[in-house]
Amino acid sequence: MKIIILDDDAFFLKALQRTIHRTITNVKITTITDINEFWQTLDKTPDIDLILSDYLMPQMNGLDVLEQCALKNPYPVRALLTGDMTLNTITRQPNVVHAYLAKPFNEADLIALFENVAALKSLPFAFNVRKQLGSMVGFPIYPVILKKLRDLVQSDDCNLREIAAVVSQEPIITAKLLQLANSAYLGFSQPTSSIDQAVSRLGVKILIAITTSLLSAKSFESTIPEVVHEEQLHVAANYAGCVKSFAKMAGFSVDDQELLFSVALLSFVGKIILLSHGGHKMSFNQQIDIHDAYSSANVVSAYVLKLWGYDTKMCSLLMSCHDVTGMQESELVKLNQALFIVKQVLFYEHTPEQLAQYCDSKGVDPLLCNIISKFDWHRYTS
């Protein structure tokens, strides 16, 4: 990775550079204290992976620097170093910051940021597509409650009651979780009004996916009517429920069923972001075979979620599920095929008979081809 760090404090830069080299391998760091030198370096190095700028500097504040970076070279991930995490700092519109490091930060925060940038670099984005994604304005800020929830889930002493308590801080999310926990789409026949039971029913992976979708939509509630939010979430939830049922019928493990549900539901994140940018006017480079709104939304979702630290498998599936032969990782091939099959029926209105023939000709797993004609599509398309 190629990284530029801008800060007027030379001693801090040396200390930070030592920390990075001690904890991160395979990284080239350029430290700069002067803003003019920074712009010259940015012009000479188009493939920088990460720009890390301090917020408080005498020549120019970090937010202004990153705004200019988004115009001059939108390819790199833009991160802000700040000791001021007040609303005035983090909610400037349009937001151009991908990640925040609050001073004092620990090595774990630094490692997490670098790992996300490295993983993003490894995903199959064409260079021009990365630049287009990086030029997005109004980038959704990683919700604080979602970080709390994910930190809790990853802790050794996690329990459902604590998770439910965090979720309950957001009434809208609580209501939606209860709605989905009572949803026929997910196969629940007995109603529940308990958030604890809803969390238990849905499982942690699905809970995180639902919460992520709802919180990301909240970032754009001033630019997109609520009825549009509801409509798009309904489409995504139907898609997620369908692919989970299809995977269950195919004998996939519970973990894989939940992963597929999450991938399908989180396509909603990219759709909402595109709608907030005026529909689907963002023209993606054809090198990665982006032909339609659904696939474009998946690419945006993968970009945002990877910067938020989501699993690379999930992001890879989001990017490849428009192509039945596009997945190279052997352990994900069948998962990708299942997503592709469900998308074709729900969004492109291919008949199961046509799709089964096509999938067979492309070498799709015979079991999945056989299930296409037996699956109850009417339940999700009516």
Image (cartoon, grey):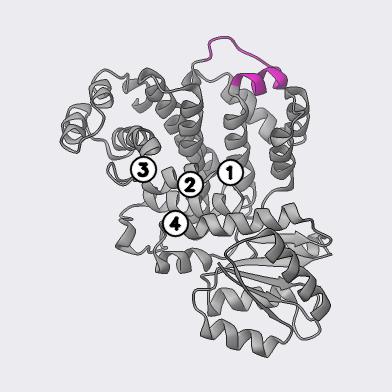
Residue 330: say if magenta: no
Q: Is residue 223 at all visible to an observer of this figure?
A: no
Label 1 CA crowd tier, 10 Å (few <14, some 14–19, many 20+): some
Please, what is the three-letter code of the amino acid marked with disc 4?
A: Gly
Q: Quadrant of the N terminus?
A: bottom right
Please, what is the three-letter code of the amino acid marked with disc 2?
A: Cys
Please, what is the three-letter code of the amino acid marked with disc 1?
A: Glu
The residue that disc 2 covers is: 315
Q: Is mark 2 on a helix, strand or loop?
A: helix
Residue beneath the point at 52% across and 85% down: 44
Q: Is residue 380 above or below residue 331?
A: above
Q: Position of residue 155 (x, y in %)?
A: 74, 34
Label 2 CA crowd tier, 10 Å (few <14, some 14–19, many 20+): many
Q: In this view, does 69 lie to the left or right of 247?
A: right
Q: In which quarter of the image is the C terminus?
A: top left
The residue that disc 1 covers is: 226
Query: Mark 3 vs mark 2: which is more N-terminal?
Result: 2
Q: Is mark 3 on a helix, strand or loop?
A: loop
Which mark's residue is nearer the viewer, 4 or 3? Answer: 3
Query: Mark 2 vs mark 1: which is more N-terminal?
Result: 1
Residue 5: name its quadrant: bottom right
Q: Position of residue 179 (x, y in %)?
A: 60, 24
Q: Do the residues labelled 4 and 2 touch (CB within 8 Å)?
A: no
Residue beneath the point at 44% across and 47% down: 316
The residue that disc 4 covers is: 279
| Magenta-drawn segment | 188-201
Which mark's residue is nearer the viewer, 3 or 1? Answer: 3
Please, what is the three-letter code of the amino acid marked with disc 3?
A: Cys
Q: Residue 321 carries which label?
A: 3
Q: Where is residue 159 in the image (x, y as percent from the top left)?
A: 75, 24
Query: Mark 4 vs mark 2: which is more N-terminal?
Result: 4
For marks 3 and 2, give the CA distance.
10 Å
